[in-house]
Image: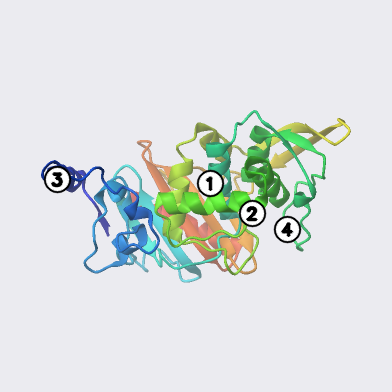
């Protein structure tokens, strides 16, 4: 495991300044680290044996160069990928297949929320169209219909707590003018964050062969979403009651419960660890997935991700074992 130090970043900045002063350059090429085919993209920086170092991008983030595992302490044999990061300490506490491309299921909605918060206004009114019609069997739905209206604030609560796929499309179309346009923004945001092993095909996370990400990229996306107070507030909630309106203006009252079984009390976090919140995701192709923010007794934050666990009943004990690494 390796985190790039701020000391190295300062040294590189001095060297680059010298080049600019004596070599006549006009500006630093700050966009280079985020190009998917660049040798110093986020993925290549952390995967090459002798990587080119994009210090300006990676100085505040943990990076994974290899698996960091102790099978005797953490049994992750039934999950395809998992990572645990000490956010403040910039330490990789656990990593298994952190850069393997996998289906994220509804963990996708972390990016959906991030893009909506970046480009939308929480008070703006959203209007549903036929884009909210989702017919896939088993898909989680709020039940909104064409003509229904709610604010972006309401929609984000339903999206993140209840994981409603129809609401994801409602948000997408209203923010970007079309679902496809919103997905383009999602992919642009992924590239800007350095999540270069990620490609989105929709706003909800239902299975598509061209829709994938990695445990590490999800850390980058979740970390960015955590910069918004409303996102932090919503993922910590256990339930939400609201009233939105149908096409005639008649009120529709609904209540929603979190899909996070730690917050519901069905599973307990390890001693000295508090689960703040996160996002769940499940499809047949993706398996059971979970991303969490947790804190230790000093309030230090940690981000944990598990992808493609065999089942929900296995996922939560796996996550408890993973979070217990905070105490080691």
Residue at point 71% right, 45% down? 170
* Circle nearer the viewer, 2 or 3: 2
Q: Disc 1 or 2, which lies upstream in sequence?
A: 2
Kindly identify which residue carries mark 3.
Answer: 11
Q: Disc 4 or 3, which lies upstream in sequence?
A: 3
* Circle nearer the viewer, 4 or 1: 4
Residue 197 image position (x, y, % from top left): 44, 62
Please tell me whether mark 1 sits on a helix, a strand or a loop: strand
Gap in angstroms between the C-alphas marked 4 and 3: 51 Å
Residue 16 image position (x, y, % from top left): 17, 46
Compared with 118, 59 (above or below) is below
Kindly identify which residue carries mark 2.
Answer: 180
- Horizontal side of 119 relative to 192 (left or right) equals right
Kindly identify which residue carries mark 1.
Answer: 278
* Circles 3 and 1 in contact, beta carbons < 8 Å: no
Residue at point 57% right, 67% down? 210
């Amino acid at each position: 495991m390796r985190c790039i130090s701020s000391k190295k970043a300062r040294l590189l900045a001095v060297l680059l300044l010298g080049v600019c002063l004596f070599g006549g350059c006009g500006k630093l090429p700050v966009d280079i680290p985020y190009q998917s085919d660049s040798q110093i993209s986020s993925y290549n920086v952390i995967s090459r044996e002798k990587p080119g170092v994009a210090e300006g991008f990676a100085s505040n983030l943990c990076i994974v160069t290899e698996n960091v595992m102790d099978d005797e302490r953490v049994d992750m044999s039934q999950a395809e990928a998992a990572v645990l990061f000490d956010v403040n300490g910039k330490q990789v506490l656990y990593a298994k297949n952190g850069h393997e491309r996998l289906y994220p299921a509804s963990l996708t909605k972390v990016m959906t929320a991030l893009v909506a918060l970046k480009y939308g206004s929480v008070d703006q009114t959203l209007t549903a169209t036929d884009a909210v019609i989702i017919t896939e069997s088993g898909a989680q739905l709020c039940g909104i219909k064409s003509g229904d209206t709610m604010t972006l604030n309401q929609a984000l609560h339903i999206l993140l707590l209840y994981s409603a796929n129809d609401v994801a499309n409602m948000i997408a179309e209203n923010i970007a003018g079309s679902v496809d346009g919103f997905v383009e923004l999602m992919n642009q945001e992924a590239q800007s964050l350095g999540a270069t092993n990620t490609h989105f095909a929709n706003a909800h996370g239902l299975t598509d062969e061209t829709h994938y990400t990695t445990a590490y990229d999800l850390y980058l996306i979740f970390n960015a979403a955590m910069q918004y107070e409303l996102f932090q507030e919503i993922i910590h909630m256990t339930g939400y009651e609201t009233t939105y309106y149908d096409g005639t203006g008649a009120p529709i009252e609904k209540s929603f419960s979190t899909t996070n079984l730690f917050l519901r009390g069905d599973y307990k976090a390890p001693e000295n660890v508090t689960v703040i919140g996160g996002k769940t995701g499940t499809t047949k192709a993706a398996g059971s997935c979970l991303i969490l923010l947790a804190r230790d007794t000093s309030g230090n934050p940690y981000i944990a991700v598990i992808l493609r666990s065999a089942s929900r009943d296995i996922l939560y004990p796996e996550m408890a074992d993973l979070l217990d690494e905070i105490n080691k």
